[in-house]
């Protein structure tokens, strides 16, 4: 029988989630769906993105509207191959990582064009609301990670990541307790983003209840620390063959022995985007402080762990 947790609606979803995204219990028809991947920073999204590039998916992300490719002023949606050295890589001439880019993509009719297999964005509510509509619904996916680990990873990563818009050299050498208390504006990120709030705004238990419902009823849930199984489930819903030669090569490349171990240990992404750093262990004052300051995200995270277990059977039924 159906899991009762998939059936009972505890509260109304925001209109974008209610009307523009498929319910997880609606059987996927990959040819009729556009995938929206919520890229939560430092949660394995970069690895997923590279894997899907490797599998030959056409992605809408940040790179497509980079002026050096000459497609940023196009008046229609076009696909192009950015690098002659990587003939399998296809991009779309939009940037779905900024609000201005999302608005441009919406005006160009990105989803209706059916040219994008997957859209990657960190601004999940804004992207879903502007890019999709009741006629062109999205199928939403995300990889989630323990919020404390994610924040610690971000703290160390942004001290050295000169290529990021959010590079923070001034954090180097700073005590993590001092940073958590005075410098980290990224608190309860998951709940805020799902509710369409800015990071400086506050969220409360009402927001948490709605955020839990959005994830429960709409998201195909993946976990960064169970990447292989998460991707297996995503691929069932996406209708992608992982067992063919190309699938096996891509899987080996991104989840092969050495890199896979490092991903599991540090869970920070791929070589360029991963960053070995001191761990903050559960039960330490540092861990407890970060968890306390991200209490709503921690509750959501523990709920997501349950959903991940609950969804296994449902998603397996879509493969039959």
Image (spheres, rainbow, N blue to C red):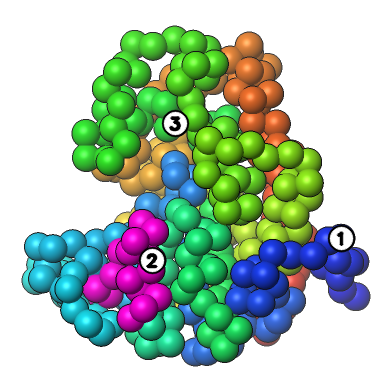
Residue 127 placement (x, y as % from top left): 48, 65
Q: Residue at x 22, y 82 (%)?
A: 75
- Between 313 and 172, the residue placed more toward the observer is 172
Q: Is residue 161 left or right of residue 44?
A: left
Question: In terms of depth relative to the viewer, which is nearer, 71 or 252?
Answer: 71
Measure the C-alpha gap from mark 2 to mark 3: 27 Å
Q: Which residues are magenta?
A: 88-108
How much space separates mark 2 and mark 1, taking CA atoms?
31 Å
- Residue 144 within the segment the image draws in magenta: no
Residue to which mark 2 is pinned: 102
Secondary element type, mark 2: helix
Mark 2 and mark 1 in contact? Answer it, CB < 8 Å: no
Give the residue at mark 1: 10
Say which element carries label 3. Answer: helix
Q: What residue is at 24 percent from the left and 62 percent from the top?
A: 63
Label 2 or label 1, whichever comes before in sequence order: 1
In the picture, the quarter occupied by the N terminus is bottom right
The residue carrying mark 3 is 153
């Amino acid at each position: 029988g159906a899991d009762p947790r998939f059936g009972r609606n505890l509260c109304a979803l925001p209109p974008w989630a209610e009307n523009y995204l498929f319910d997880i219990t609606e059987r996927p028809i990959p040819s009729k769906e556009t995938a929206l991947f919520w890229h939560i920073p430092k949660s394995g999204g970069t690895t997923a993105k590279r894997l899907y590039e490797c599998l030959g998916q056409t992605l809408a992300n940040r790179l497509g509207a980079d002026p050096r490719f000459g497609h940023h002023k196009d008046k229609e949606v076009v696909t192009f191959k950015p690098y002659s050295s990587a003939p399998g890589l296809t991009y779309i001439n939009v940037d779905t990582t900024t609000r201005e880019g999302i608005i441009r993509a919406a005006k160009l009719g990105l989803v209706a064009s059916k040219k994008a297999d997957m859209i990657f964005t960190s601004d999940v509510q804004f992207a879903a609301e502007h890019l999709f509509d009741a006629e062109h619904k999205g199928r939403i996916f995300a990889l989630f990670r323990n919020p404390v680990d994610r924040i610690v990873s971000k703290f160390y990563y942004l001290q050295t990541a000169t290529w990021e818009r959010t590079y923070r050299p001034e954090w180097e050498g700073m005590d993590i307790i001092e940073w958590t208390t005075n410098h980290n504006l990224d608190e309860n990120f998951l709940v805020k983003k799902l509710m369409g709030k800015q990071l400086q705004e506050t969220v409360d238990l009402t927001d948490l209840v709605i955020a839990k419902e959005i994830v429960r009823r709409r998201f195909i849930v993946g976990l960064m620390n169970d990447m292989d199984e998460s991707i297996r489930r995503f691929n069932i819903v996406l209708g992608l063959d992982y067992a063919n030669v190309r699938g096996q090569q891509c899987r080996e490349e991104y989840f092969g022995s050495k890199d896979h171990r490092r991903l599991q240990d540090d869970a920070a992404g791929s070589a360029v985007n991963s960053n070995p750093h001191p761990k903050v262990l559960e039960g330490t004052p540092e861990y407890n402080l970060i968890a306390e300051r991200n209490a709503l995200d921690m509750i959501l995270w523990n709920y997501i762990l349950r959903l991940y277990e609950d969804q296994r059977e449902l998603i397996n039924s879509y493969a039959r």
